[in-house]
Image: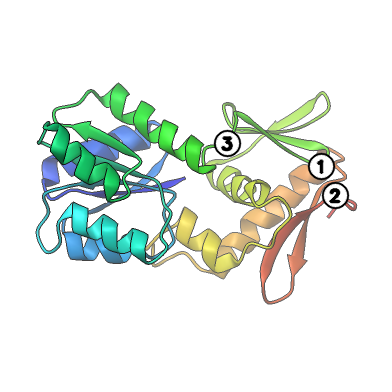
Amino acid sequence: MRILIVEDNRRLAESLQDILRRQGYEADVSLDGAEGYQQVMSGRYDGVILDVMLPGMDGISLLREARARGCTVPVVMLTARSETEDKVRGLESGADYYLTKPFDKDELTAALKAVLRRSGEMVPDVLEFGDIRLNQSSYSLERGEKSIRLGKREYEVMRILTCARGAVVSKETMILKIWGDDGDAVDNNVEIYVSFLRKKLNFLKAETGIATARHLGYYLTEGGRS
């Protein structure tokens, strides 16, 4: 799961990035409001941590514009202002949660999990499709009594496909959500991890498989092994 941090205090932004990475998230940083707006609208992020006071474009304006253009990504808003009026402005602009600086890191991660869960991005610990289960706590793919551990990238690909519930997911979407702006990530990256996952599904003797939609992407199917 990829989170965007829009915060102009570099030290705080990098600290937040470290906290999120230790929690298993991919995390990117933007130090400018205008740049942050473009990244928020890119569709590559599952959640956003957004500061109010930013150069280029303040957080309230950024969020209002994003919401007006149909962006539904969950947002945790950060501010040094604790007055009720400021909190109301943030929430009315479209924030899902409001934290006042300074905050505890456990409070931050709990808030992020809460907004992701409400948005539908945060799924239960065990995700099911067909005859398989994806255990998000152990990074394991399971069928019946058998299970096999997944690598981090394998897990991310499988999570995206399972959350799609049989809908086609393009390679481009997977690259954006898993690798972000990494220039080394290409279509072949997705193909490699799909191949790994197919072998693991076969190992589990799962009826659920990963099917290819030619020139479109991949989707899960219950109609037989891949």
For the point 18% across and 48% down, which residue is it?
A: 7
Q: Is residue 30 above or below residue 42?
A: above
Provide the residue designation for mark 3.
123
- Taking the image as shown, residue 75 lies to the left or right of residue 137, namely left
Residue type at mark 2 is Glu
For the point 61% across and 45% down, which residue is it?
A: 159
The answer to the question of whether label 2 and label 1 lie on touching residues, with beta carbons closer than 8 A, is yes
Pointer 2 or 1: first along the chain = 1
Picture coordinates of residue 131, whole percent (x, y): 83, 38
Provide the residue designation for mark 2.
222
The answer to the question of whether label 1 and label 3 lie on touching residues, with beta carbons closer than 8 A, is no
Q: Is residue 65 above or below residue 208?
A: below
| Colour mapping | rainbow
Q: Secondary structure at mark 3?
A: loop
Few, some or many C-alpha atoms within 10 Å of disc 3 (few <14, some 14-19, many ≥20)? some
Provide the residue designation for mark 1.
130
Pointer 2 or 3: first along the chain = 3
Towards the viewer: 215 or 89: 89
